[in-house]
């Protein structure tokens, strides 16, 4: 689902249903999914909190994912 939503984010703004899906991910997922969902929603402060919960090795791996491009945007 994150991959699909990431593609949508590149093409257009999210509709309400897509935003709802991302919010659900921020509530019911592991740290990496919560981080990714917050990045896509544009919640930079929340994303930073989750990113800082990752170990240095996990941060390094996460930085290699295409979704990380949105984190710095």
Image (tube, rainbow, N blue to C red):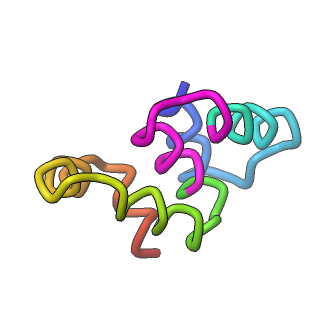
Q: Quadrant of the N terminus?
A: top right
Picture quadrant of residue 17: top right
Q: Is residue 22 above or below residue 62?
A: above
Q: Is residue 25 left or right of residue 21?
A: left
Q: Is residue 40 above or below residue 48?
A: above
Q: Nearer the viewer, residue 1 or 43?
A: 43
Q: Is residue 60 left or right of residue 69?
A: left
Give the residue drawn at x 63%, y 33%: 25
Q: Is residue 42 above or below residue 36?
A: below
Residue span colored magenta: 26-38
Q: Is residue 60 above or below residue 42?
A: above
State whether the magenta stretch is mostly helix, strand or loop: helix
Give the residue drawn at x 54%, y 29%: 29
Give the residue drawn at x 63%, y 28%: 28
18 falls in the magenta region: no
Across and down, in percent, residue 36 comes to 48, 47
Q: Is residue 20 left or right of residue 67?
A: right
Give the residue drawn at x 51%, y 62%: 47
31 falls in the magenta region: yes
């Amino acid at each position: 689902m994150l991959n699909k939503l990431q593609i949508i984010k590149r093409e257009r703004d999210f509709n309400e249903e897509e935003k709802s899906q991302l919010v659900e991910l921020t509530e019911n997922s592991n740290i990496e999914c919560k981080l990714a969902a917050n990045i896509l929603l544009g919640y930079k402060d929340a994303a930073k909190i989750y990113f800082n919960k990752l170990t240095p090795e996990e941060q390094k791996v996460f930085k290699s994912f295409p979704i990380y491009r949105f984190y710095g945007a």
